[in-house]
């Protein structure tokens, strides 16, 4: 029995690793064509799906299809670059974090330390329910009600980097708030009581006792929220404007990697599809790097 | 417990498998029409047809993999592609793409071919641009920034609209051509996801203009522009103008009906029209007959349903050609 149990748990644990490696290789192989074609300059090229004239040598080898829609045209080739969605993903995630972090901390402190028990209970449930709302609903709410308000306040377009970032912030709030509250609650009462006994105020206890004690949990909550924000598709697709253009200001439209994938995958073929896989591969790497840094660097620092 | 689970799983599996007699997937543009045809066909014959809207390319992928019995595509395949994938093709219904806009107090705005191309190219930056003013002398057009709204996701609607742009503008044809998704030029445009997204953006963004299928524009009460056609007439987007355009469509059974019909001749024809197509796998004789029976029934008995949804049923001369094509290929 003991042995079966051990083997089964080992199996479950290794499945995660196998899946992770499987995804990595699938993405890598499917994006190979685009990698060979564009190389690393894909990452710095802001032009997505742009027609360029073939050089004379290439043009000679092109056979014109007898059924071509526009047979008199000179043949062109399409180039793809990923800079715009990469920048869009990083910026929208940053906006979401900057917006959500202080609010989430405020909520967590309120729930864990300040609110009376019954209030804390009700608000806590509300926060958890917020996490259960499907992202499509955030997207539609954002498009129909939130975007017009944002435009009235800051001008520019209704759908923009800012609108997408703020709604993304609201979406990741509950994760950060709930996990932070739970880790704050693990602070032993004896620590807090001794601080109060020494004459510390509530603010000082929160700042100097509870925050340092629950740092690991807080950083963990940020990492989880970050992962969610980087990959969020549905809500952002409605709100970011979906244009392959570097944002000139915070209130101008742009696009993120998940949105580019969701919008274009259905109709993509050949090199276009491979370029989308390349983008997916890059998103995989970005998430991996960001979360690894957070995990290994910050958590190590805190534990010291 | 396990047995119960297994049993339910099996029961569910079999009900799902037998739910549809014929399965199709693909283009979302004609989805509402197919949906009402399927309903009518089911109540008449008890045959269950299932059509999933996934976009034209997904439909093509599905039928090439033989995952469905038929596929819908807004962009036709040419005879070479059909030969390679061993498919038959025929048109099913004609729809229209309209130019909707959001300018207060401007009804029936007239948009010339030149203006439309320049707007799509991102060159018309303000509403009081000469190109728009010229054709609308009686409309008070403000000096407001123009926002162009387009589809963000790949779609047959975009393919048909950009095909039309390629027909009317050399510059567009050179730099973009006809595509299901593209990187739109200019710096004052936004993308909406699906037709619903485009409709919402046009509705909520003052001084915007965008292309959308007729049914969605009508359902959302959007203003629709009067568009200049090939012969220089300004045509209001309405059913009889779409019908005039469909009548001119040159769809040749010898080429498996391969043709994009936008920008037809005819002085009453609305220019931005599109036929949507059905693909059949050559080797599946039995299911093909079931599919053609469904479309044959719909052509004959459900034409009115299409009209109610803002689409144009195929003219009789064309459905006769399609029936002949079916019987020649032995799928009827």
Image (cartoon, coloured by chain):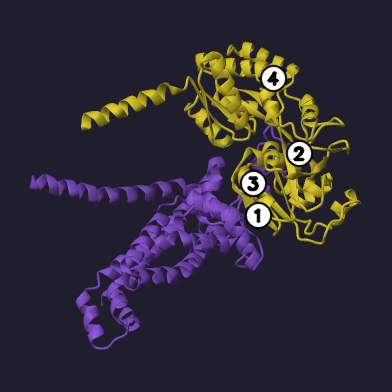
Chain colours: A purple, B yellow
Residue B316 x/y as whole percent? 74, 17
Q: Quadrant of residue B270?
A: top right
Q: Is residue A78 above or below residue A101?
A: above
Classed neighbour count for the residue bearing mark 4: other residues with Cα under 10 Å, few (<14), some (14–19), many (≥20): some
| Mark number, residue B190 | 1
Q: Chain of mark 2?
A: A
Q: Chain of mark 4?
A: B
Residue at figure coordinates x 40%, y 61% from the top left: A174
Q: Chain of mark 1?
A: B
Question: Foreground mark, 2 or 4?
Answer: 4
Q: Is residue A102 above or below residue B111?
A: below
Disc 2 from disc 4: Cα separation: 24 Å
Secondary structure, mark 2, is loop
Is the same chain shared between marks 3 and 2?
Answer: yes
Q: Which residue is mark 4?
A: B253
Question: Foreground mark, 2 or 1?
Answer: 1
Disc 3 from disc 1: Cα separation: 35 Å
Residue A262 x/y as whole percent? 52, 47
Question: Foreground mark, 1 or 4?
Answer: 1
């Amino acid at each position: 029995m003991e042995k079966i149990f051990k083997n089964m748990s080992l199996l479950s644990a290794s499945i995660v690793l196998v899946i992770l490696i499987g995804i990595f290789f699938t993405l890598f192989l499917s994006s190979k064509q685009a990698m060979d074609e564009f190389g690393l300059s894909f990452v710095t090229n802001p032009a997505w799906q742009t027609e360029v004239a073939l050089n004379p040598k290439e043009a000679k080898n092109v056979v014109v299809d007898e059924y071509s829609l526009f047979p008199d045209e000179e043949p062109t080739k399409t180039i793809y670059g990923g800079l715009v969605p990469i920048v869009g993903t990083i910026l929208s995630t940053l906006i979401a974090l900057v917006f959500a972090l202080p609010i989430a901390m405020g909520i967590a402190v309120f729930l864990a330390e300040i609110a009376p028990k019954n209030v804390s209970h009700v608000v806590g449930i509300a926060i958890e329910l917020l996490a259960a709302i499907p992202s499509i609903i955030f997207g539609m709410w954002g498009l129909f009600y939130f975007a017009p308000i944002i435009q009235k306040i800051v001008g520019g377009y209704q759908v923009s980097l800012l609108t997408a970032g703020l709604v993304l912030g609201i979406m990741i709030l509950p994760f950060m708030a709930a996990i932070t509250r739970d880790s704050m609650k693990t602070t032993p009462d004896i620590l807090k009581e001794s601080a109060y006994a020494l004459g510390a105020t509530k603010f000082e206890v929160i700042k100097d006792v509870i925050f340092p004690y629950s740092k690991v949990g807080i950083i963990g909550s940020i990492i989880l929220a970050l992962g969610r924000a980087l990959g969020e598709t549905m809500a952002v697709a409605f709100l970011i404007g979906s244009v392959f253009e570097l944002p000139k200001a915070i209130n101008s439209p742009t696009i993120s990697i998940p949105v580019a994938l969701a919008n274009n995958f259905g109709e993509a073929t050949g090199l276009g599809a491979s370029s989308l896989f390349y983008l997916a591969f890059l998103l995989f790497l970005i998430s991996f790097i960001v979360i690894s840094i957070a995990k290994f660097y910050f958590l190590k620092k805190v534990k010291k | 417990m396990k047995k119960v689970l297994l049993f339910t799983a099996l029961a569910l599996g079999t009900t799902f498998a037998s739910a549809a007699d014929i399965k199709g997937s693909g283009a979302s543009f004609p989805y509402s029409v197919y949906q009402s045809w399927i309903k009518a066909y089911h109540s008449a014959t008890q045959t269950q047809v299932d059509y999933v809207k996934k976009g034209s390319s997904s439909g093509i992928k599905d039928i090439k993999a033989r995952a469905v019995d038929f596929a819908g595509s807004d962009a036709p395949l040419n005879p070479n592609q059909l030969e390679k994938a061993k498919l038959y093709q025929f048109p099913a219904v004609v729809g229209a793409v309209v130019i909707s806009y959001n300018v207060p107090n401007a009804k029936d705005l007239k948009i010339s071919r030149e203006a439309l191309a320049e707007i799509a190219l991102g060159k018309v930056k303000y509403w009081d641009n000469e190109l728009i003013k010229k054709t609308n002398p009686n409309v008070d057009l403000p000096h407001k920034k123009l926002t162009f709204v387009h589809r963000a996701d790949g779609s047959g609607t975009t393919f048909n609209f950009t095909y039309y742009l390629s027909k009317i503008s050399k510059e567009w044809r050179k730099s973009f051509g006809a595509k299901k998704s593209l990187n739109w030029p200019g710096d004052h445009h936004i993308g909406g996801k699906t037709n619903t997204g485009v409709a919402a953006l046009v509705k909520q963004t003052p001084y915007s203009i965008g292309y959308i299928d007729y049914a969605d524009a009508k359902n959302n009460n959007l203003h629709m522009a009067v568009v200049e056609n090939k012969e220089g007439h300004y045509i209001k987007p309405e059913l009889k103008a779409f019908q005039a355009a469909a009548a001119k469509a040159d769809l040749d059974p010898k080429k498996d009906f391969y043709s994009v019909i936008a920008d037809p001749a005819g002085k009453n024809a609305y220019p931005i029209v599109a036929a949507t197509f059905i693909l059949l796998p050559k080797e599946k004789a039995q299911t093909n007959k079931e599919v053609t029976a469904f479309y044959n029934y719909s052509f004959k008995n459900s034409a009115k349903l299409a009209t109610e949804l803002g689409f144009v049923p195929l003219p009789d001369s064309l459905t006769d050609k399609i029936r002949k094509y079916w019987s020649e290929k032995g799928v009827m």
